[in-house]
């Protein structure tokens, strides 16, 4: 079961999300808050798996919550859930450490799926928002280190690109006609060779090198 903490400064919106998620057997809502200070306190106290985080909050904005929590619980994952689809909002919260960004137009099934994917380590964005992130990080690319990419086999490079685009292991397995276990083996090999510790870091690494 995925333990979720909800952060939004609109009480009615929180009530709506709470009602939607409480009907999901795979999700346990462990707390909620409406501003930065209460959010940090509540998240640190409950240590949820995933935080649904609004971008615009009293007391500093959603991006202020993430580093404060990660200083205590670096394992907590954040999924931005906001009415805003502005590039600057998306980029700011991703730079702060969120693993994904979806807008409040998302339906119940989509939100439940996004929570599950973020809990599993995926990066989750709508296609338009993903473009903002990729463009932003591509603009910061350091000198390309070809020796790192060359160390990967062609199949590992395929897996790298698809994982960085947000594919789940099952989706990737179907696309490449291999088993999920083989996908897991390839991902482990890619992370080891590139000296990365998570799929989130892998996505940034790929975006920096314009591999997507």
Image (cartoon, rainbow, N blue to C red):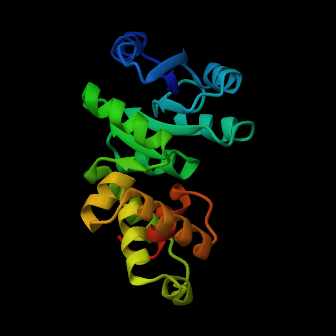
Q: Which image quarter is the C terminus in?
A: bottom left
Instruction: Report the number of discs.
Output: 0
Would you place residue 61 above or below residue 32 in this image? Answer: below
Which residue: 61% across, 37% down? 76
Residue 168 is left or right of residue 146, and the answer is: left
Q: Is residue 54 above or below residue 85?
A: above
The location of residue 210, given as percent across then percent down, is: 39, 75
Residue plotted at (54% across, 52% down): 95
Image location of residue 89, percent across then percent down? 42, 44
Q: Position of residue 26 (x, y in %)?
A: 42, 24
Look at the image and tell me whether residue 61 can be seen: no
Which of the 4 image quadrants contains residue 20? top left
Residue 81 in view (yes/no): yes
For image coordinates 53% across by 34% down, the residue present is 62
Measured as percent of width and height from the top left, residue 161 is found at 38, 69
Q: Is residue 192 left or right of residue 119?
A: right
Residue at left 38%, top 18%? 21
Q: Is 101 situated left or right of 94 in this image?
A: left
Choose between 8 and 205: the one closer to the eye: 205
């Amino acid at each position: 079961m995925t333990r979720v903490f909800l952060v939004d400064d609109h009480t009615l919106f929180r009530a709506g999300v709470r009602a939607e998620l409480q009907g999901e057997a795979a999700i346990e809502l462990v707390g909620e808050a409406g501003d930065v200070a209460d959010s940090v306190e509540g998240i640190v106290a409950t240590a949820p798996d995933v935080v649904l985080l609004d971008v615009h909050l009293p007391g500093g904005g959603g991006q202020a919550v993430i580093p404060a929590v990660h200083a205590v619980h670096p394992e907590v994952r954040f999924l931005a859930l906001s009415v805003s689809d502005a590039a600057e909002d998306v980029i700011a919260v991703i730079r702060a450490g969120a693993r994904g960004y979806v807008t409040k137009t998302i339906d119940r099934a989509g939100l439940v799926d996004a929570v599950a994917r973020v809990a599993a380590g995926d990066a989750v964005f709508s296609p338009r928002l993903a473009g903002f992130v990729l463009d932003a990080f591509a603009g910061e690319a350091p000198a390309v280190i070809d020796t790192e990419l060359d160390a990967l086999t062609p199949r590992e490079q395929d897996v790298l690109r698809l994982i960085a685009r947000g594919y789940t292991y099952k989706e990737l397995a179907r696309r490449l006609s291999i088993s999920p276990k083989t996908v897991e083996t390839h991902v482990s090999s890619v992370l080891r060779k590139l000296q990365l510790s998570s799929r989130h870091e892998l996505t940034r690494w790929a975006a920096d090198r314009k591999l997507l």
